[in-house]
Amino acid sequence: MGCCEYKNKLEDQFNIKLIFECIRLKHLKVLKRMLSSNQFNKNKNYFLQKLNNERSDYKNLSLNTLSYALILGDIKIFILLHKAGCSLSSMESILLEQGLSSLNIICMKGYSNLLSYYIAFCMSENESYYNTKIFYKRILENDFNPFPGRNFTPIQLATIFDYIQVITVTPIQLATIFDYIQVITVINEYVKNLNKIPEIMDLDYIENITGMNCPLLAVKYGNFAMVKYLHKNYNCNFHLKDTNGLGAVEIAVNESSENINKPYGMIIVYLIDVVGVKYDGVLSDTVNKIIDPKLKAYLMLKLSKHEDTNIFSHSLNNINEYVKASSTNESYAFDDKTEIQMISGSSVIEFIC
């Protein structure tokens, strides 16, 4: 009886519901006082057990304190809880049973600051967490949207999730698909000091089912700033063909007819004129799929290299904007910083200026 009364008294002093509320409302100072109190330090093991095991609902997910802070991307609260003794393995197990992993969440949400702190710790844990099949469609059905503030339509979002659900996509490939240059930078700053780059952090790792690496994924999803960033900063391999036998140019041409709002024309010109991707025997079969008349004129000029190109001279002014934007020797020759943000879908100024 005395033991039960003692536990009840401790719970009164350290209300787990209040902890979750502090995390949700980002009340760092209140949480810091609670975790540095005499009551917490005197009964630390008991309270840590509650922090690791007690759960709260978040958009149909059931999360403990550390995973709750991670989902919200609150780096200060995450670090506070971790340094207080909260278990990373407990967090990972809770996420895994719901078809999630911490590293994949970070890469889908673009939490680069959190990744800078967390990456060394997560790689010291069991790497099998991050090679496990993740049920992304369940996340979508449960209204966990990794694109806050982005203008994806429900159909576009569902298409992305349907695609990555059937393949074993890696965290760095997720960051490429979702266009987070900062995350790519953090990962590569970490792996450059390793003797061997883990597959889950390798830009040139080829996914088995699709045959795609990060460069081809950047092309597929129309992420022009990412394409330039991967080429200029890491000299990534854009010369692969996927399991369907399609190269980067063909992939971009096919996608351009499906998503006219992405800058596939600039990507195609950049791939051909800057990266040097081979297109012989490709364009003649795909040029008729092009909707954009300026891009079509550019590709026809390429096809006519052994013919009299004067018949296409009327198209030169139309395609000049593509050539200027894509074939510059500068890594990022944009005049307006907001234009870079618009193209990349993320704040990339600190990495590309």
Image: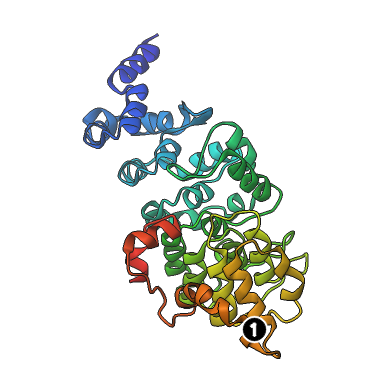
Percent position (x, y) of residue 93? 56, 40
Say if 183 sits above or below 20 in the image: below
Q: Quadrant of the C terminus?
A: bottom left
Residue, x 64% and y 83% (percent of image)? Answer: 311
Q: Quadrant of the N terminus?
A: top left
Dividing the picture into quadrants, the one containing residue 351 is bottom left
Q: Nearer the viewer, residue 5 or 102?
A: 102
Percent position (x, y) of residue 343? 44, 60
SS for dot 1:
helix
Dividing the picture into quadrants, the one containing residue 9 is top left
Q: Nearer the viewer, residue 306 or 137?
A: 306
Name the residue that disc number 1 marks.
311
Residue 296 as seen in the image, left or right of residue 28: right
Percent position (x, y) of residue 157? 58, 43
Q: Is residue 194 visible?
A: no
Say if 148 sits above or below 193 in the image: above
